[in-house]
Image (cartoon, rainbow, N blue to C red):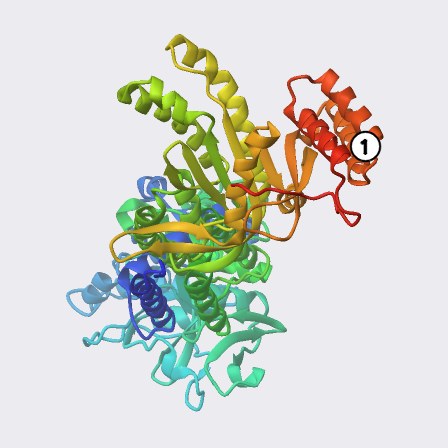
Amino acid sequence: MQFSNKWLKTYRSLACLIITSLFILHTANWLEIPTMQRMEHIFYDLRLRTTVVNTIDPRIVIVAINEESLAMEGRWPWSRDKMAYLLDMLFDYYNIKLLGFDMVFAEPDTSSGVALLNKLASGPLHGDTAFLSAIAALRPQLSFDEVFAKSLQNRPTVLGYFTSHVDEKIDQVGLLPTALTPSSGLPFTPLLVNAKSYTANLPVLQSAAYSGGFFNNPNVDQDGVYRKLPLLIQYHEHLYESLSLALFRALLGQPKVEFITGEEYGKADSRLEGLRIEGFTIPVDAGAAILVPFRGKQGSFHYISATDVLNGTTAPEKLKDKIVILGATAPGLLDSRATPVQSLYPGVEVHANVLSALLDRSIKSRPDYILAAEITELLLIGVLAIVVFPRVSIITSAAVFGLVLTAGTAANFYCWRVWDIDTMFALPFTLLCLLYGVQIFFGFFLESRKKKQLSDMFGQYVPPELVEQMSQSGEAFSLQGESREMTVFFSDVRGFTSISETMAPHDLCELINAIFTPVTQVIHDSQGTIDKYIGDAIMAFWGAPMHDAQHASHAVKSALAIIDLLATMQNGFKARDWPSIDMGIGINTGTMSVGNMGSQFRMAYTVMGDAVNLGARLEGLTKQYGVKIIVSETTRQAAPGFAYRELDRVRVKGKRAPITIYEPLAAMADATTGSRQTAELLNQGLQAYRQQQWDSASAIFNSLSAQYPDDKLYTLYLERIGIYRLSPPDADWDGVFTHTSK
């Protein structure tokens, strides 16, 4: 049985695929997700606010019809003769370079009273020669529109007007400026904003001005925020330019505008991609709109009150050779806009920002090819979530998530600041978070189910910590039988039969529990698996269910720790009037069969094979050699990080092939010089013994026995030598001792 929970993984991949597909459809404009569009606007505004230059452009000055001007000069609109005087002051006294009007003069000025005088002249006073003569002399001065028109003539002035883009019929008022070009025959015009009507300036004024441009914005986003502004609109098969573009072209002497389409770059698409003016390409979208390049909050340009200009109180150097835009900023004149940098922003400053960016030739854009890059980005995020996240740990997936998020944010800001390219941020950011959330959501259930299944199968054999490690390892664990190299461990309490005869059953249970609990903990701490408790014996193994490259070392380390633990427990046993406890441990490493074995009535996760049987035999030999731990030669080879002493070469019952058995003394780093020297001397004695040099061997073993009188091993060899002296072994004797009992 595998623990992959295939149906959960399938649903997880399917959820990621559906979410990614919806985001791609939204990006390709085949499906609208309003929430995502709103989020994209929020992130766009945030990115814009954090990257604006927040400097003042000294080339452009805004002459404001502000509250101070209204208080000093009277309510708006002002008479045209006052506007003419304002114009004369700007050009003749302050010597400005260019003047743009963020306002429209659509109705005649009748404030001079000339209409009443004309009525009198044609009525009651039509015969009064003196009156008629005076009117004829005053009429040019009282025709304020004519006065204003004369001030506009032969000066670089750009008048503003606005257009209507709704379907209802609105009268066409005033005179439009000269069109930029006829739109007939241009392939991109169906995607341009199509004006339905307009309100423009009086013919006498527009004819006198240098040019004109529309100042309204038909591209306001659904949340009412100005983020884009069209540079061109179409009206009755003619193209007209915006106020900011008209000002830019007026500075350059009205150069020709070239239209760049996708065909110029070898594309089949003939949509508009840019406007080229004297070698400078202005990137625009298919609707001829640009992203408004805000420099910062209100105040990115110098403001001068119109009344100060009229009264000459402004220092001339503040306006000399400047580009001036005349606009209303008084709250009552309702010329404020919602923008990404400020909720109430003067409309006149929007045009100033666009003109400033045109002068700097730094316009941010969303080129057509960026759509393919954005879809590719979403696809890569989807692949990351479906392929990578499920195959790595939670910590690794969190690191990958953080890395991708950081890299994506950095790349987005790099494109914005260095390449002046606007790429989507909210969609890939949200998609990454959503897909990562899906992985966490399904991963929680997968992990929980996997842990439960692992705990159900292995919880009785391995500690909870190992079950946790197994669940995070990514391995597929099974109770089915398999063959692998492992290390088996057998322990037995010495003299347990005699002990059990002297203790009450209740006390005996307490004693066994007091021994097995800490011993089991030591085995668990070293990633060992408890196979079974057999009376006073413990069987354990390393290397399953989790693969463990250090299984032999972990087993030897556990055995040494258990012997040390028993030594420290003796005082506690003595205090409870329990007998002293000793233990023998046998360890062998080899190929074993591991899996769930038993019958239809009862199963157990265990190991079997010759290597297991040998481990049990080694535990039995600890009594004969008077040692606490015996390991096989294969275990010694697989666990080289310990100091050993060789005990013997033996044939155990049931096996014909001889093996060398060892006693582990300590970790290599903890082994003392004395123990190393003793082990070396023992090796010399064993060599002499196996070469039947009885006198040399006896001398060595007698020396060791005198030095370590409690060590049974040396006495054992002295007894064997005594026997061999009386009954020498065969000439081909190989030094192997055959044990005939378990």
Residue visible at 72% across and 20% down in the picture: 705
Res. 234 in view: yes
Residue 110 in the image: x percent, y percent?
A: 26, 61
Image: 229 above or below 738: below
Farthest residue in the front direction? 726
Q: Is residue 355 left or right of residue 220?
A: right
Q: Is residue 581 left or right of residue 549?
A: left
Closest to the observer, 515 or 201: 515
Q: How many marks?
A: 1
Q: Quadrant of the N terminus?
A: bottom left
Farthest residue in the top direction? 575
Which SS class for mark 1? helix
Residue visible at 59% across and 68% down in the picture: 252
Res. 348 in view: no
Image: 84 above or below 198: above
Q: Is residue 126 left or right of residue 678?
A: left
| Tag 1 residue | 694
Q: Is residue 211 left or right of residue 500?
A: right
Residue type of the residue flagged with mark 1: Trp
Farthest residue in the left direction? 124
Closest to the observer, 10 or 565: 565
Residue 725 in the image: x percent, y percent?
A: 77, 33
Residue 419 in the image: x percent, y percent?
A: 58, 61
**Residues packed near mark 1 inside 10 Å, few (<14), some (14 to 19) or many (20 plus):** some
Closest to the observer, 13 or 653: 653
Residue 498 in the image: x percent, y percent?
A: 40, 22
